[in-house]
Image (spheres, rainbow, N blue to C red):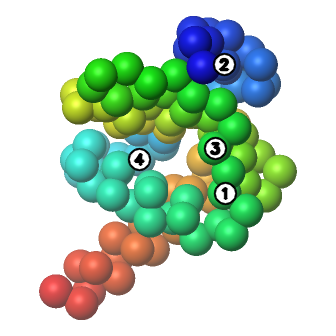
Amino acid sequence: MGNTVAEMLEMYGLSTAESLIDSLDATWSESEIKEYCWQVLRTFPDLKKENWSIGIEGGDYIFSFSGHYVFITDDIWSFNLIAERPVLKLLVEQMIGLNKTKHYDS
């Protein structure tokens, strides 16, 4: 859709939002963060891609769910999610729960 990251963040009220990566401790690998984050996001039945900018290696996306917006960078080099603190808290709690279940089942 051609929007820059800054425009996308501003348009959806996320210009002062925080990173999911900063909300998790250093024991999480980027691949785990990506895997668990998408698992959690897909549990929201109203998850909707609102806006995006796609390149050859991946893209930047705005998704909405439960009245909230998140910005996701997902490309071959990195993954990150930007959201307001309450949304990050919700996602982190659910991701930690999934991670504990996975390690408990192993």
**Mark 3 or mark 2: which comes first in sequence?**
2
Residue beneath disc 3:
49
- Residue 6 appearing in the image: yes
Left or right of 76: which side holds 8?
right
Mark 4 or mark 1: which is in front? 1
Q: Is residue 20 left or right of residue 68?
A: left
Residue 31 horizontal/vertical position (percent): 24, 49
The residue under label 1 is 47
Task: Name the residue tied to disc 4.
Answer: 24
Residue at x 58% of width, y 12% of height: 2
Quarter occupied by the N terminus: top right
Residue at 77% over, 19% down: 11
Q: Secondary structure at mark 1?
A: loop
Separation (CA) of disc 3 from disc 2: 13 Å
Neighbours of disc 1 within 10 Å: few (<14), some (14-19), many (20+)? some
Q: Amino acid at mark 3?
A: Lys
Q: Amino acid at mark 1?
A: Leu
Going from the N terminus, do you reach mark 2 or mark 1 first? Answer: 2
How far apart, in angstroms, are the residues tagged by discs 2 and 4? 24 Å
Disc 2: CA contacts within 10 A as few (<14), some (14-19) or many (>=20) = many
The residue positioned farthest toward the left in the image shown: 106
Query: x%, y% of residue 83?
Result: 63, 37
Residue type, numbered disc 2: Met
Sequence-first tag of 4 and 1: 4
Task: Give the SS element for disc 2.
Answer: helix
Residue 55 sits above or below residue 21 on the image: above
- Residue linked to disc 2: 8
**Spatial distance from mark 4 to mark 1, Cα to Cα?**
22 Å
Sequence-first disc among 2 and 4: 2
